[in-house]
Every structure is written in structure tokens, then in C-alpha cells.
């Protein structure tokens, strides 16, 4: 035999709180003390530190839908400690006293300059800090990067500026010559034409 079961809300007709227990437990925002930062006013000194250290104030940021790719970095001191391991894996090679290593094959995209360089290193990496490059060169090695360094970008901008200035000067000279040519024409047009004799 089929029994039609009544909906819960109709079965709770006549109940003051509809299954929520005491009236005070289901009063909306008033039950939790307000919305947002409501209730952040006066409080005892013992409770102030816990309130101030919580995330009540300031912008909390957001979660980007397109997150940036993580950068795998390695310091020079760590690189030298792992050099034999890289050689055994075929990532690095030793020719006499020079160690050649391609950090891209090791999944490392950036070289950092922490640590003293005691070996001659020939390194290929996507990007490296200027401090790391200077240390490797001072030890007799070299660093080849696939990303333009900040110094190189500055040089490229500095080379582009004179060309822009020269083009602006040429445009200014052309405008001046145009204005000089227009002035005689204006003077001639400004002269009154002689009246015709009747």
C-alpha cells in the first residue's frame, strides 16, 4: 500500500521553531552577534590581542583563476653539493676542471647567488640573478641564460631613446619650415585688393 508522506514543513505547522530547538538558537545574524565585523568595539584588554591578530582588518586578497607557474630555484652552494649527483644522472658533464650543466634538464629554472663558488661552472639556465652570474664568472666559469637580464633590458631601452628623440627633432624642424612657408601666403592674402575704376 502506497503512503503519501507529507512534506516536512507542513508537518511542522504549529511548531514555533520548526525543529530548531530553542527560539534563541535560530534568530539569524543576531544569534552570531551580527554580520561582518559587527561587535568589534569595546572589549577587555585580555581579549584585544586575539581580536587584533585575527584577519579582521585589511584586504585579504583573492584566489586567481590563472595561477602563476612555480619557479624552481637553486643556490650556488646547493648546486655544487649536488654536482656529482647531476653527473651520475647525465645532467652534468666534467671536462678536466670544468663542469658543464644544463639546469633546464634538471627542472630548475632559476639560479641564485647564495654561497661561494669553488668550481669552474659552465651553466645553462632560463634565468639567473646578477649576483650568481658575477660569482660564477669570478671563479672562471660562465652562465648562459635564455631570459633577458635587467641590465640588457635597460641597455635596449637606452638605445631606443635617442632614436625617438631624433625623430621628434626632425618632426619639429619640418613643422617650423611649414609654418615659415605659410606666413608669406597669409601676408599676401591679407593685402587689400585695389578697387576697380568705374
Image (cartoon, rainbow, N blue to C red):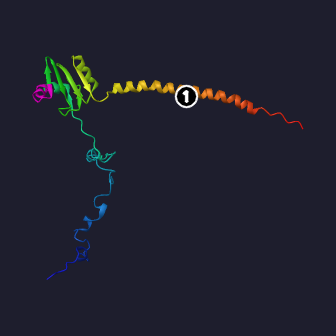
Q: Residue 4: x percent and y percent?
A: 19, 80
Front one among 151 and 194? 194
Mark 1 surroundings within 10 Å by alpha-carbon count, few (fewer than 14), some (14 through 19), many (20 or more): few
Front one among 52 and 6? 6
Q: Residue 62: x percent and y percent?
A: 31, 47
Residue at the bottom extreme? Answer: 1
Q: Is residue 167 above or below residue 41?
A: above
| Badge count | 1
Residue 88 colored magenta? yes
Front one among 137 and 13? 137
Q: Residue 159: x percent and y percent?
A: 42, 24
> Which residue: 14% across, 17% down?
97
Residue at the left extreme? Answer: 88
Q: Residue 108: x percent and y percent?
A: 20, 32
> Which residue: 25% across, 46% down?
50
Q: Quadrant of the N terminus?
A: bottom left
Residue 193 colored magenta? no
Q: Quadrant of residue 78?
A: top left
Q: Quadrant of the C terminus?
A: top right
Residue at the right extreme? Answer: 198
Q: Which residues are magenta?
A: 82-92
Q: Is residue 22 above or below residue 184?
A: below
User: Does dot 1 land on a helix, a strand or a loop?
Assistant: helix
Please say whether residue 116 is visible from this viewpoint: no
Front one among 157 and 35? 157
Residue that carries the numbered disc 1 in the rendered image: 171
Side (left or right) of 171 relative to 58? right
Side (left or right) of 82 relative to 14? left
> Which residue: 57% across, 27% down?
172
> Which residue: 24% across, 23% down?
143
Q: Is residue 177 above or below residue 58?
A: above
Amino acid at each position: 500500500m502506497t503512503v503519501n508522506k507529507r512534506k516536512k514543513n507542513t508537518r511542522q505547522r504549529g511548531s514555533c521553531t520548526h525543529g530548531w530547538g530553542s527560539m534563541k538558537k535560530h534568530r539569524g545574524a543576531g544569534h552570531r552577534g551580527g554580520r561582518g565585523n559587527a561587535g568589534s568595539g569595546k572589549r577587555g584588554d585580555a581579549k584585544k590581542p586575539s581580536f587584533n591578530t585575527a584577519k579582521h582588518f585589511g584586504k585579504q586578497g583573492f584566489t586567481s583563476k590563472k595561477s602563476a607557474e612555480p619557479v624552481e630555484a637553486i643556490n650556488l652552494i646547493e648546486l655544487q653539493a649536488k654536482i656529482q649527483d647531476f653527473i651520475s644522472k647525465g645532467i652534468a658533464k666534467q671536462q678536466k676542471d670544468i663542469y658543464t650543466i644544463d639546469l633546464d634538464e634538471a627542472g630548475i629554472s632559476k639560479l641564485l647567488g647564495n654561497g661561494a663558488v669553488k668550481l669552474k661552472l659552465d651553466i645553462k639556465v632560463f634565468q639567473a640573478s646578477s649576483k650568481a652570474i658575477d660569482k660564477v664568472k669570478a671563479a672562471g666559469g660562465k652562465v648562459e641564460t635564455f631570459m633577458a637580464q635587467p641590465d640588457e633590458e635597460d641597455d635596449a631601452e637606452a638605445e631606443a631613446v635617442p632614436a625617438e628623440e631624433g625623430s621628434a627633432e626632425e618632426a619639429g624642424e619640418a613643422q617650423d619650415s611649414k609654418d615659415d612657408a605659410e606666413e608669406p601666403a597669409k601676408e599676401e592674402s591679407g593685402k587689400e585688393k585695389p578697387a576697380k575704376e568705374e
